[in-house]
Each structure stands twice: as C-alpha cells, then as structure tokens.
Amino acid sequence: MHIQLSLFLALLCTTLAWAQPPHKEIKQLFAKYDKIVEGNKDVSVADVFTKKFIADAGGEKSLLGGWEKEKKATYVLSIKPSRTNKDRAYVQRVPAGSKQKPHSSFVVVKEQGKWRIEGNIEDE
C-alpha cells in the first residue's frame, strides 16, 4: 500500500512539473512586451500578442498607439498554469521589491508553438 501511494505521488508530482508553462519563455515574452510598450520598433507585435488580441484591439497601429508613456519599472512575474489547458497560463506583474497588489494580470496562450499574450484581466 505504501509503495503504491509513493508511486502515485511521484507520478503526480512529475506530471504537474511537465504541465508547468516554461517560465523562461514567458519571461522572454514579457521582456518583448516591455520593449513594445517603450516604443521599440525592433519587436514585432505579432511576436507578443495573439492574432485575436491584435484584431480585437483594432489592429497593430491602434494597439501600438494605445499606451501611455510610463517610467520604466522592474516587475516580478507570478506565473500560474491553467488547471484545464496546458497551453494557457495566467501571469501577474508585481513591481519588484513591493508588496503591492499585482500591477497587471494577463492571460497567455500558446499560439503556433510560442507563448503569446491573449488578453489582460482587470479587477474593475
């Protein structure tokens, strides 16, 4: 009985580890996101956002013009995988060194094999 329980727990732990979204890839995605918000033209909007998000925002030009200039800040990402879909995760950005509530929350999905931002979650 103990052996079966141990094997079951080991299998469960390894399965959960495989279900985790790759943190490195999502951190790279948000580094690109920050560059777009800062106005850097070297990063493609299609590399950061899903096609649906771009279309819902009114297109690439509308999306690029929608950000106010903010002073640059460093954020810590809290990445949580979806319980039902391995290709979806939820990301919260909290200002580094702060115990404030998350600055922003995002839904990220895998589109064409790469992580992209599908939308944001507003608390309002």
Image (cartoon, rainbow, N blue to C red):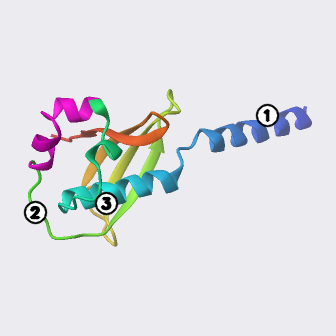
Residue at (14% x, 49% y) in the render: 64
Q: Which mark is residue 69?
A: 2
**Are discs 1 and 2 less than 8 Å apart at CB?**
no
Residue at (30% x, 69% y) in the render: 74
Above/below status of 39 relative to 58: below
How far apart in space, not on screen, are marks 3 and 2 (Cα)?
18 Å
**Amino acid type, mark 3:** Val
Closer to the N terminus: mark 1 or mark 2? 1
Look at the numbered disc 3 and give the secondary structure of its residue.
strand
Look at the numbered disc 1 and give the secondary structure of its residue.
helix
Residue denoted by label 3:
94
How far apart in space, not on screen, are marks 1 and 2 (Cα)?
51 Å
Above/below status of 85 relative to 34: above
Look at the numbered disc 2 and give the secondary structure of its residue.
loop
Q: Nearer the viewer, residue 1 or 71?
A: 71
Lateral position of residue 12 relative to residue 25, left or right: right
- x, y percentage for residue 29? 39, 52
Lateral position of residue 52 relative to residue 27, left or right: left
Magenta extent: 52-65
- x, y percentage for residue 51? 29, 32
Residue at (44% x, 49% y) in the render: 79
Disc 3 vs disc 1: which is toward the camera? Answer: 3
Residue denoted by label 1:
8
